[in-house]
Image (tube, rainbow, N blue to C red):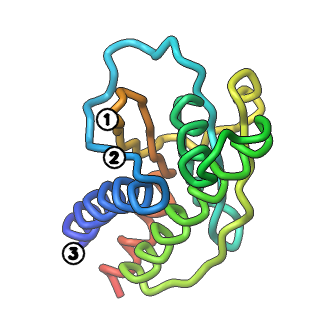
């Protein structure tokens, strides 16, 4: 059951990221392999936490140009400023992260709440303490923009294993 649940969660997360992004903004993402070298593009991170002790960390990392395009497509016009781009990025995260946590709950038969997301623009990501190891899914847009969706492996594995043993 654990292996099946883990595989299901990977597939579900992949579909969620692609479908939610497309439905909200028209941006088409597809699965991609991990880049061999770090991107030279500016990357922002949106982070949220779930669990009673905030043990589950969920991250959405995206090139800023994709987040700008996302906000522009949602607004139908140019975003007013970087803060507006960040607000739309957090909204995208809320939808993807909320649906992801709902799927974790369904598989593990648990319930928890998510914290409001925080935006870590490029240059401030050192302020974010990562809960490693992370499971990371990689995506690329039709314009070549890179996106990653990540979650802390250990707490979710623990939930899935507990359900299997129940």
- Residues at badges 1 and 3 in contact (C-beta under 8 Å)? no
119 displayed left or right of 135: right
Structural distance between the alpha carbons of marks 1 and 3: 35 Å
- Residues at badges 2 and 3 in contact (C-beta under 8 Å)? no
Local packing at callout 2 (Cα closer than 10 Å; few below 14, some 14-19, many 20+) is some
Q: Position of residue 111 (x, y in %)?
A: 56, 84
- Residues at badges 1 and 2 in contact (C-beta under 8 Å)? yes
Structural distance between the alpha carbons of marks 1 and 2: 6 Å
For image coordinates 40% across by 46% down, the residue present is 27
Q: Which mark is residue 50?
A: none
Q: Nearer the viewer, residue 8 or 41?
A: 41
33 w.r.t. 107: above or below: above
Local packing at callout 1 (Cα closer than 10 Å; few below 14, some 14-19, many 20+) is few
Q: Secondary structure at mark 1?
A: loop
Q: Earlier in the sequence, mark 1 or mark 2?
A: 2
Q: Which residue is mark 2?
A: 28
Q: Earlier in the sequence, mark 1 or mark 3?
A: 3
40 w.r.t. 142: above or below: above
Local packing at callout 3 (Cα closer than 10 Å; few below 14, some 14-19, many 20+) is few
For image coordinates 51% across by 35% down, the residue present is 66
Q: Secondary structure at mark 2?
A: loop
Q: Which residue is mark 1?
A: 142
């Amino acid at each position: 059951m654990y292996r099946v649940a883990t595989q299901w969660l990977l597939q579900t997360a992949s579909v969620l990221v692609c479908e939610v992004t497309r439905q909200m903004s028209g941006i088409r993402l597809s699965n991609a392999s991990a880049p061999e070298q770090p991107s030279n593009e500016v990357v922002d991170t949106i982070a949220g936490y779930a669990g009673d002790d905030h043990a589950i960390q969920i991250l959405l990392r995206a090139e800023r140009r994709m987040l700008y395009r996302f906000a522009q497509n949602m607004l139908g016009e140019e975003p007013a400023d970087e803060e507006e781009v960040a607000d739309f990025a957090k909204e995208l995260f809320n939808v993807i992260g909320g649906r992801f946590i709902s799927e974790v709950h369904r598989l593990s038969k648990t319930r928890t709440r998510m914290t409001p997301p925080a935006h870590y623009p490029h240059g401030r990501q050192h302020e974010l303490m990562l809960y490693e190891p992370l499971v990371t899914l990689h995506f690329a847009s039709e314009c070549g923009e890179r996106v990653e969706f990540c979650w802390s492996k250990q707490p979710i594995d623990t939930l899935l294993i507990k359900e299997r043993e129940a």
